Image (tube, helix red, strand yellow):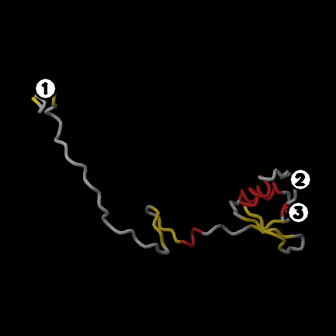
Amino acid sequence: PAPKKVLNDKNSFKNINTNSPPISPRPVKTPTAKPKALSKTMSFKDNEKTVAKLRPKAAIVLNDSLPVFDVAVKMTSVRADAALLVNKSGELTGIITDNDFTRRVIAKGIDVYSTMVSELM
């Protein structure tokens, strides 16, 4: 149907569409519930995960005489965040983390093939 012409308050005609719904004000959203307090169990969609499951994985033990590249490859293959470094007699000589690779190796431009991981400690 053709829009009707009506007289507005300035004595001129304007077109209005009779098929459009009436304009109503936008509804105001009000909070429905208070947020729940944090607990030891958090819900992620339909899976329940406890805080204990969010811990990082256990570190791996590697020889400190390995090149930096080999340590990085072994850590990546098991998705480890850190490696405990031991000497030939099995004594702990240091710990290297994924953050150490960024700060001590990549940022300083160290050659990962010729540098032993013990030199970073």
Please tell me whether residue 64 is drawn above or below residue 2 in the rendered image: below
Image x and y of residue 15, in percent? 16, 27
Residue labelled with disc 2: 114
Q: Is residue 24 left or right of residue 73?
A: left
- What quarter of the picture does the N terminus occupy? top left
Image x and y of residue 103, in percent? 75, 57
Dot 1 crowding, Cα within 10 Å, few <14, some 14–19, many 20+: few
The amino acid at mark 3 is Ser
SS type, badge 3: loop
**Extreme residue toward the front, this view:** 10
Q: Nearer the viewer, mark 1 or mark 2?
A: 1
- Residue 83 marker: none
Residue labelled with disc 1: 13
Residue 66 occupies quadrant: bottom right
- The residues tagged by marks 3 and 2 sit, at their Cα atoms, a distance apart of 11 Å
**Residue at image point 69% right, 69% down:** 58
Q: Counting residues from the N terminus, which is met first, the one under dot 1 or under dot 2?
A: 1
Q: Counting residues from the N terminus, which is met first, the one under dot 3 or under dot 2?
A: 3
